[in-house]
Image (spheres, coloured by chain):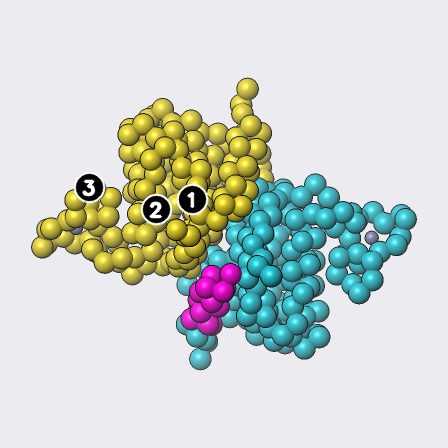
Chain colours: A cyan, B yellow
Amino acid sequence: GDVMEVFFFPDKEIPCKVHFLSETRCFKDSCKYSHRKTSLSELYRYLGSCRRSMDVCVFVMTCVDLADIVVSMRQRGVAVRVITDDEQEKITGSQIWRLRKEGICVRTDHSSNFMHHKFVVVDDQLLINGSFNWTRNAITGNQENVIVTNHTRVVGAFKAEFEKLWEQFDPK
Amino acid sequence: GDVMEVFFFPDKEIPCKVHFLSETRCFKDSCKYSHRKTSLSELYRYLGSCRRSMDVCVFVMTCVDLADIVVSMRQRGVAVRVITDDEQEKITGSQIWRLRKEGICVRTDHSSNFMHHKFVVVDDQLLINGSFNWTRNAITGNQENVIVTNHTRVVGAFKAEFEKLWEQFDPK
Ligand SMILES: [Zn+2]
Ligand SMILES: [Zn+2]
């Protein structure tokens, strides 16, 4: 079916990763995380739906939980590619070193300009895009938006942009 | 008809404002600006189509050309409202003081978190949204995206977000 959804941040609760990202639900009565739907849990759901390819093009990536999802996709055999900003890669808390350590291909802009996109293309058919960098503050602090869509032309445009930047940022 | 368009930055050329924003086209042979379509000229076109209301919710606003459009809308009697980030309002080159001087209502988050949205709702029926802050670097330097749509549910969600933040950031 057609997917066209909008989510706003900040969230008031932190979603339970077991509940929203594992095969089973979380049944811990004492779980301190939320089992209710939040904007982040919806983002987890869409990222977690990935089966074949994940093209991540995000300016800032310091959130451990979101980096975890990318790493677990790689471990499951998903073709993961990441584009980020070269200055942001070096900041405290950046998760890019972890992604590289896991063997994920990461390319950066090598420019003082910002590689300022914040989008993901999932399985060439779903776009996640908005103002949302992958930081803790974006989840529970800032005003942010994320649009999720499988609109063919829009997904295609972002996929083409990813491929263009992937070539442009080839270090060779 | 249905509007669902995607624009990417950086642009290679600076569009001629006379050509894209005035009633007539520019006929100067010696014009040093571009008369060809660019991502910014498309943004000009959509912003310029505004007739009744313009709700601007943008993190950074330092671009004089884009601030000019908001000011001219106000002067034409369009109901203009602006939400921005309180720290960004104070940075060098911020255009917020100009908007306030023209009598435009501006509200800010009064918080150390980021009011990080970058969207505009035009006439309650068109949404302009993406990674694009209103800066010079976003136009000719950075990698950025803008989605323009009149998708009813999406526009409605952003309009509701604007109204929510407008109340939330009421200084009274
Ligand atoms: Zn739980
Ligand atoms: Zn001209």
Judge whether residue B100 is colored magenta.
Answer: no
Residue at x 54%, y 25% (from the top left corner): B170
Element assignment for label 2: helix
The image position of residue A52, as x and y in percent, is: 63, 74
Residue at x 80%, y 58% (from the top left corner): A18
Badges 3 and 2: C-beta atoms under 8 Å apart? no
Element assignment for label 3: loop
Which range of residues does the magenta coloring cover?
A: A151-166
Residue at x 66%, y 49% (from the top left corner): A39
The image position of residue B77, as x and y in percent, is: 32, 27
The residue furthest right is A29
> Picture quarter containing residue A23?
bottom right
Badges 2 and 1: C-beta atoms under 8 Å apart? yes
Residue at x 30%, y 47% (from the top left corner): B45
* Dot 3: chain letter: B
The image position of residue B165, as x and y in percent, is: 55, 33
Label 2 amino acid? Answer: Tyr
Residue B46: assigned label: 2
Residue under pointer 3: B23
Label 3 amino acid? Answer: Glu
Q: Give the class, few, some or many, for how many residues have Cα within 10 Å of label 2's Cα (few <14, many ≥20).
A: some
The Cα atoms of the two marked residues, 2 and 1, are separated by 8 Å
The kind of secondary structure the magenta stretch mainly shows is helix
